[in-house]
Amino acid sequence: MDTNILLESGTNELELLEFTVGSNTYGINVAKVSEIMMDQTITPMPNSPEEVEGVFIPRDKLISVIDLHKVLRTERPANGKDIIIVCQFNRMDVAFHVSSVRGIQRISWTDINEPPAVTGSSDSTYSGMATGVAKVGGKIIIILDFEKIVSALNNSTGLDTSGIDDSSQPDRIISNKRIVVADDSQFLNKMIVSTLAKTGYKNVVSFQNGEDAWEYVLSYKNKASDDTPVTDLIACVISDIEMPKMDGHRLTKLIKDDPVLKKIPVILFSSLINEQMYAKGKQVGADAQFAKPQFNDLVASLIKIIREE
């Protein structure tokens, strides 16, 4: 699958794979998609939740299949051609069973809005599943929080999110240094803030999109001086890559292109970190990059960066 857009620096754009589940339209970042397949023979696993359809082995790799129809509580179309979307993120492989795939949309992150606070969902397990909502060609595309879906099923499915619940941290410190966190997943945003708090970083300000994080960081530019370095005001920015309004690469580039703010360390913490994305992160000036859910590595890097300031 062509993902050359991912190598372009500072475009604030993404390619979105558009698919349907029942009668509704959803999207996933093409960077997470490794393969699209017609419906496969899937072997059910004993004692699995109903949302986990089972496993299959394409190309000698065992992959769990999650039925998004059951996750989203919708019926499969009677005349639908069921499709399997095989994904790779958070250093794991997982597949999602959908109704159809419609194609790829190239859009700007500015066209993606945060989902409304009230969605009508009464299922606490899957509440807050949407990370963004885009209007493309007159239709609404909902971008799902696939990391949260997988994590909610993880205990029973054995899906690999090793480290995400590991509370062991480096030597505990107490710091009033201000840390800015930007992550559109409510689930992972809260987990990052909680992990930093356990380590001793209590002064954490979090946002669910890069634009709001950038405006916050920018507000401190004129407060910096020779007596008050900007890193005394904001010690570090920890950012996801996928976010509504402004992605993490664009946020990093804006910070690093600014003559005052460029001294603020930026750590990219994303499920999308691979060789290509790492190269792009370096290109825009990221000080460190880690793939979710490497929380211990994230905290260790943060401590090292702040101590060297």
Image (cartoon, rainbow, N blue to C red):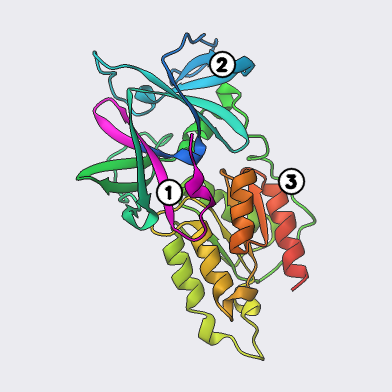
Q: Which residues are magenta?
A: 1-26
Q: Is residue 297 magenta?
A: no
Of labels 2 and 1, earlier in sequence is 1
Picture residue at 63% right of the left edge, 40% below the top: 164
Q: Circle 1 sits on which residue?
A: 14
Relative height, residue 120 to residue 10 (above, below)? above
Inspect this view and state whether residue 173 appears.
Answer: no
Q: Read off the residue under disc 3.
A: 168
User: Nearer the viewer's eye, disc 1 or disc 3?
Assistant: 1
- Image coordinates of residue 107 in percent, x first then y, are 35, 50
Q: Is residue 165 left or right of residue 21?
A: right
Task: Judge the density around disc 3: few (<14), some (14-19), many (≥20) Cα neighbours within 10 Å.
Answer: few
Q: Position of residue 98 (x, y in %)?
A: 37, 24
Residue at (58% x, 14% y) in the render: 57
Answer whether residue 134 is visible to the viewer in this image.
yes
| Callout 2 amino acid | Pro
